[in-house]
Image (tube, rainbow, N blue to C red):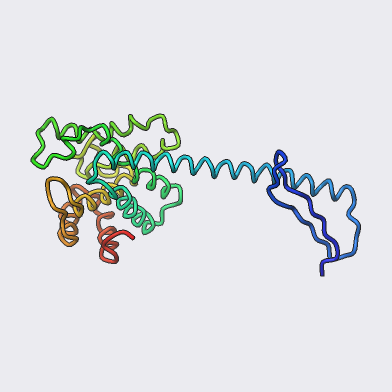
Amino acid sequence: GICAVLAVPIKFKNKLLGVLIAFSKKIKHWSEPEINLLSIFATHAAIALNNAMLHNQAGWNYYNTMITLVKAMEAKDPYTRGHSERVTSYAIKIARKLELNESDMQLLLYGGKLHDIGKIAIPDFILRKKSALTPGERAEIEAHPLKGIAMITRLKFLEKSFPLIRHHHERYDGRGYPDKLKGKEIPLLARILAIADAFDAMTSERPYRKGFAINKAIREIERNSKTQFDPQLSKLFLSILREAPRPD
């Protein structure tokens, strides 16, 4: 039923981005005002498409920056290889169960990937030590959230994820670090990350111990609910683990 077609190129700085097409079911000659109107629409479309492509490219640049930081962290401490990906996977599963929005999912992606970035600043002999840490060495380890924030503070696109990185070692009973926040004082996304991080740490091999069996790690989550972990999030996470104990 199409009897007439008008096609106008969508161009930005002489680069063809697409074509805007109008159809008519009647035989007609397109008037100058109609051609001008469609040309105006094409101009607006060209600007919008160009901005969208620039935004998408910026997004990939941000992501690649983040992945570079993660690889640097894993090169520093081989025992953490894959840890950030698994922690992020667990955290995202919890967020989906809570039906959190896409913005929160994005923050968990950034925060999960980079939560241990501060360990780059921790001496190798501490990270890879097989015996018990001294109080001074423990203090160095516990400084890694703050060291991480200091390292990436100029990366403004990560700014909203800073609370996750800073507070993922806070405890629900207020005995965590670095700020000894308690209960709901700890940001929700940091509470989610805390459970995901602890579970993967328990089930992964470390220089000083073998990884826990899944069932033992589940019992540890149950035992530390209300003290180390948010009890509601603990219950939710355990239900996820019983469905699929390891991330995809």
Image quadrant holding the N terminus, namely bottom right
Of 120 and 49, the residue lying toward us: 120
How many circles with numbers are drawn on the protein? 0
Residue occupying the point 31% across, 59% down: 247
Image quadrant holding the C terminus, namely bottom left
Of 220 and 205, the residue lying toward us: 205
Q: Looking at the picture, how far across and down is residue 136, in whole percent?
A: 13, 30
Residue 111 location, quadrant: top left
Left or right, 203 with respect to 40, comes to: left
Of 4 and 177, the residue lying toward us: 4
Q: Looking at the picture, how far across and down is residue 164, in whole percent?
A: 33, 41
Left or right, 232 with respect to 20, comes to: left
Q: Looking at the picture, how far across and down is residue 3, in whole percent?
A: 85, 65
Residue occupying the point 31% across, 55% down: 90
Asked if one can make out residue 39 in the rendered structure from this viewpoint, the answer is yes
Residue occupying the point 8% across, 40% down: 132
Residue occupying the point 40% across, 41% down: 66
